[in-house]
Amino acid sequence: QVQLVESGGGLVQPGNSLTLSCAGSGFPLNLHGIGWFRQAPGKGREPISSISISGLTTFYAESVKGRFTASRDNVNSSVYLQMNSLEPEDTAVYYCARRRPGWRATATTWTQATDYDYWGQGTRVTVSP
């Protein structure tokens, strides 16, 4: 059974940092790209990052570029999202998602939710004084 489980969310003050984790099970995570999305209260789902199988290729939304960094540990079947300089606008539920087998992300396709076939349940991040 394919599962993705996010963790690491919480309440932080503006300017602080958090690292989210995405643990994969039931499939070889080292054969899939992984995407990160978020959904803020009252808003639609927003793609924020994607990381390739090797970890060498990453994409970021403009809203998080320079502040967020995606990485992965294929040995331990985990993907991470390091979030620095957090802002109240980063408040959202964060999801990781598995790219469909063989679907390599490009600069124009990494944002497409339909390119991902399994999603985690999300972890909530609240940025507030």
Image (spheres, helix red, strand yellow):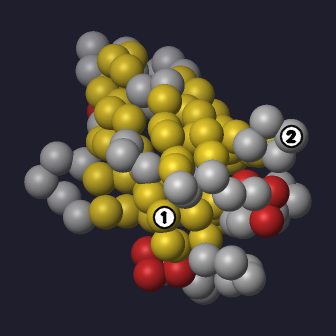
- Image vertical order of residue 127 relative to residue 44, above or below: above
Residue 42 as seen in the image, left or right of residue 54: left
Residue 55 in sight here: yes
Name the mark on residue 49: none
Q: Give the crowd class for mark 1: few <14, some 14-19, many >=20 residues within 10 Å.
A: some
Query: Which of pointers 2 and 1 lies earlier in the amino acid sequence?
Result: 2
Residue 48 percent location from the top left of the image: 50, 58
View extreme (left): residue: 42
Residue identifier under label 1: 118
Residue 87 percent location from the top left of the image: 39, 33
Question: In terms of secondary structure, where does tag 1 sit?
Answer: strand
At label 2, the amino acid type is Val
Which residue is nearer to you in this view: 62 or 51? 51
Q: Are marks 2 and 1 in contact (CB under 8 Å)?
A: no
Residue lying at 63% horizontally and 46% vertically, measured from the top left: 25
Residue 80 as seen in the image, left or right of residue 124: right
Residue identifier under label 2: 75
